[in-house]
Amino acid sequence: STEVPFGDISLLQKVVAPGDTVLLLPGEYKNEHYGDGDIWKDEDTLRIWKWKGAEGKWITVKPQTPGSVTVKCDSNNAVILRTCQYVRVSGLKVIGEVENIPLEEAKAHQFIYKDKAGDIQYRVPQGSTDEEIAAMKGLKKNIKALRPPHYDTKGILAHSCKHVEILDNEVGFMPGTGMRVQGGDRISVLRNVVHDNSRRSSA
């Protein structure tokens, strides 16, 4: 209720039911350790996992007052829906850190990752120029290792979902992808404004 609201949307996983509407109170929502300078932290801001609506009984997530909710993130995902069914997310303003990451900082971390032992590695020698990188052969691609989430934050991610609607949101200034659907079926992405994303991503 608005009188005694849940402190974290993830707490609703066990109580949300088909046909429910989840209202987000006005304000700014951030991941737990937002702004602490840790580029490796593993956090999401709004984590919507395993919510199960039903045909004709969608679960809806939206602001209590239109235009009153801003979601920020400096880690993995501002909004993530995972293994959800018949869930609708609408009316959010999702803003990333692009304007707070200097271009030179992003370039310095462009090819950094952690190996399986947790040691920091670089795909190319530090200090390489753009021309030197372009001329390199045999550059490793699709490394299955941890890259700094701070430079790859996604705005709204729907992962392994069925029957999900992402409607009327604004998603901008995410270092990584503005919106992404991965392994989904019957996902509707309509009337969103998506801008200024993927400008500080690691590779």
Image: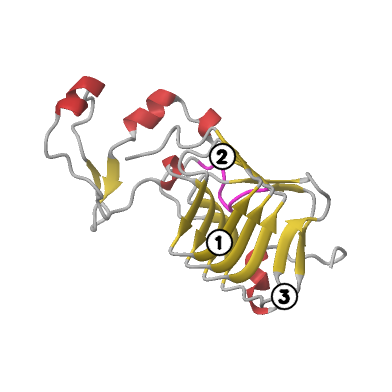
Q: Give the residues in magenta.
A: 29-36
The three-letter code of the residue at mark 3 reads Gly
Label 1, on which residue? 187
Q: Position of residue 2 (x, y in %)?
A: 85, 63
The residue shown at (51%, 36%) is 197
Q: Residues within 10 Å of mark 2 (few under 14, many from 20)?
A: many
State which quadrant residue 10 falls in: bottom right
Q: Please give the residue where the numbered disc 2 appears in the rendered image.
A: 96
Location of residue 162 with respect to 122 vertically, above or below:
below
Please tell me whether residue 147 belongs to the stretch shown in magenta. Answer: no
Indicate the quadrant containing the C terminus: top left, top right, bottom left or bottom right: top left
Q: Residue 13 placed where, x, y %?
A: 63, 74
> Residue 101: image x %, image y %?
48, 30
Dot 3 and dot 2 residues touching (CB under 8 Å): no
- Decide: is 110 above or below 162: above
Q: Position of residue 55 (x, y in %)?
A: 67, 76
- Closer to the chain start, of discs 2 and 1, is 2
Give the amino acid type for the residue marked by disc 1 in the picture. Answer: Ile
